[in-house]
Image: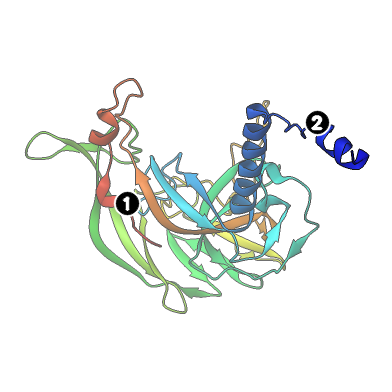
Amino acid sequence: MDDSATAQTAAPAETLKPRSELRDTLSFLLKLAILVFIVRSFVFAPFSIPSGSMLPRLLVGDYLFITKWNYGYSKHSLPWSVPLIPGRVFAKDPARGDVVVFKAPPDAKTDWIKRVIGVPGDTVQMRGGQLILNGKAIPKQRVADFVLPMTPNADCDAAIEATADGTPVCRIARYRETLPGGKSYDVLDAGTSAGDNTEVFTVPAGHVFLMGDNRDNSSDSRFEPVMDSTGTNRGGIRFVPMENIQGKAVVSFWSTDGSAQWVLPWTWFSAARFERIGEGF
């Protein structure tokens, strides 16, 4: 008898290691987390509107996407501002009129959204509620009033009135501003406020001057930061470093009037403002 043949016949069959469902699940979740981290850091990210400082374009309860590649990347491009990117790479300055999401000075911990008004070298001033850019008054045309239905998350800076059917609404004077280069957008003017008359600001290199479209209810570059005892900024932001900018607002993907209740799924749809979905900037 062939001894080698006998040995081969007698060898035990190779056993397969049992698959671990837990290990496979954890591996999938890790890969998914890495993918989400990359997409949110370098491609696009969602952002929700918590205040009325950007009325009339953005309402409280709007959700939008921002693109991350427009102005380059810094540590603030990453979730939680993880310090993996030194300075600012692939840098590109925003244009006047862009709506941007950024980490608000001075602590750079909170996400804010405003419109770019001044870029490095510009001079910016408000005079009697009129925007003055580089010594010239920006064209400001009166248009139809902004009328906002009063819903649970509505933010109104003017007197509330009732329509013919008794529905309460907020009515605020609206104007159309047009920046050099042709970028136009609507702003609100509810009356006089501390931000209607300012000194002349000169935007330093590497920074931008940002303002909210709701001019009488926006803490922005017209004001200095004011920190309270809890470390929360109750004031403005003055000049914002370019590296604080996270991305450019591009499109709204959801909007709710605040009347939805999580325990009542049908209210998720009745509260939706479908007409606002898909609006660009």
Which one is in front, 201 or 83?
83
Circle on res. 12? 2
Residue 175: x percent and y percent?
Answer: 32, 62
With respect to residue 134, does 185 lie above or below? above
Using residue 250 as the reference point, say whether residue 268 is left or right of it.
left
User: Answer yes or no: do the residues labelled 1 and 2 have beta carbons within 8 Å?
Assistant: no
Three-letter amino acid code at the position of disc 1: Ile
Mark 1 and mark 2: Cα distance apart in space: 65 Å
Crowding near the residue tagged with mark 2, few <14, some 14–19, many ≥20 C-alpha atoms within 10 Å:
few
Three-letter amino acid code at the position of disc 2: Pro
SS label for mark 1: loop
Q: Which colour scheme appears in the figure?
A: rainbow
Residue pointed to by mark 1: 277
With respect to residue 66, does 48 lie above or below? above
Report the number of numbered marks.
2
Residue at x 68% of width, y 51% of height: 76
Residue at x 74% of width, y 45% of height: 82
Q: Is residue 198 visible?
A: no
Q: Find the residue positioned furthest to the bottom.
A: 181
Residue at x 45% of width, y 43% of height: 49
Q: Find the residue positioned furthest to the front.
A: 1
